[in-house]
Amino acid sequence: MGYVTRASLEKQPHEVAEMFDDVAEKYDLTNDVLSLGQARLWRKEVAKAVDARPAQKILDLAAGTATSSQPFVQAGAYVVPCDFSLGMLSVGKQRHPHMPFTAGDATRLPFADDSFDAVTISFGLRNVQETDQALRELYRVTKPGGRVVICEFSQPTWAPFRTVYTEYLMRALPPVARAVSSNPDAYVYLAESIREWPDQPALASLLQSAGWSKVAWRNLTGGIVALHRGFKSA
C-alpha cells in the first residue's frame, strides 16, 4: 500500500501508488531476494499469530498481490485482500481470480463497523502518513473480541547488528534492487521509510492509543521485523 511517508514527504499519494503499481509484477520475487529469503519465514509467523479459523472473516490490509493472504485462505477463512495500489490488485486478481480484492484507503476503509474477526497488515503500515487514523480504522472494522496483527520492519535490538543493518539498507539495497526490480527507486524510498519508522515500544504505544488492548510484540530476525498484536475488548 502506498502513501506519503515521514521520510519522503515530497511524494504525493498518487505518486507513491504509481510507484507500487510499477513494481507489482515482480514485487514478491524482489522482496524474497532483498530479504535474503526471510520474507517467507516472516509470512509464516504472521499466519501463526493471526491464527485464522474456518468461517472467520479476515481483512488483509496492504495485501498487494495477496501472497500474504494465502495462509488464511488455506486455513478455511474468508479473506478480503485490500490495497491502495490498483496495479498490485490487478496482478493479484490475475493470480487469484476467486479472491474478493478490494481497493481501499487505510485511513478510510470501505467496510462496516465490526466486520472482521481479525485484521492484519504486513509491511504496509509505515507507508501510511496518518498511522493513528489507520490503527483506529482497523479497530473500527474489527469485531468485539477480535484481534489485530501487524508485521513491520523495526529496529534491531543489538547495537552492532543495527549498525550493519542500516548500512545494508542505505548502501547495499539500492544496487541489489537495480539488479532485480523494474523500479529500483521504489526500494530506495522503502529503505528510507524503514529507517524513519518508530521502534517496537513506540508502535505498541500507538496501538494502545487507538484503543487496542493486551498489546504485545515479539522480534523476528533480531528485531529487523517486529510482530505486534492487540485485541478489541468484547
Image (cartoon, rainbow, N blue to C red):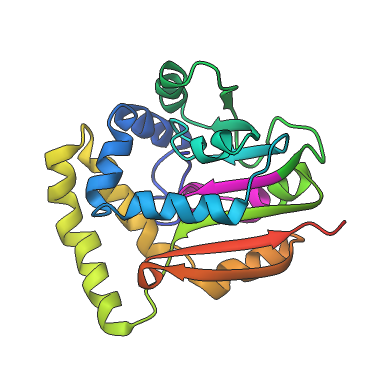
Residue 231 falls in image quadrant: bottom right
Q: In the image shown, does 16 or 28 lie closer to the viewer?
A: 28
Task: Report the residue at 65% width, 56% height from top.
Answer: 132
Above or below: residue 61 compared with residue 230: above
Provide residue 191's location: percent of width, then percent of height. Answer: 30, 55
Task: Report the residue at 50% width, 35% height from top.
Answer: 70
Q: Kindly give the residue lying farthest to the bottom in the view shown.
A: 159
Above or below: residue 172 compared with residue 165: above
Span of residues in magenta: 118-135
Provide residue 182's location: percent of width, then percent of height. Answer: 21, 31
Q: In the image shown, does 20 or 55 lie closer to the viewer?
A: 55
96 displayed left or right of 78: left
115 displayed left or right of 224: right
**Residue 222 painted magenta:** no
**Residue 122 painted magenta:** yes
Task: Report the residue at 47% width, 57% height from top.
Answer: 152
Q: In the image shown, does 187 or 67 lie closer to the viewer?
A: 67
Q: In the image shown, does 33 or 203 lie closer to the viewer?
A: 33
Q: Kindly give the residue lying farthest to the right in the view shown.
A: 234
Task: Report the residue at 72% width, 65% height from top.
Answer: 209
Q: Is residue 125 visible?
A: no
In which quadrant of the rendered image does the C terminus lie? bottom right
Q: Is residue 88 visible?
A: yes
Provide residue 115's location: percent of width, then percent of height. Answer: 78, 37
Above or below: residue 201 compared with residue 105: below
200 displayed left or right of 112: left
Provide residue 55's location: percent of width, then percent of height. Answer: 73, 34
Numbered-mark total: 0
159 displayed left or right of 154: left
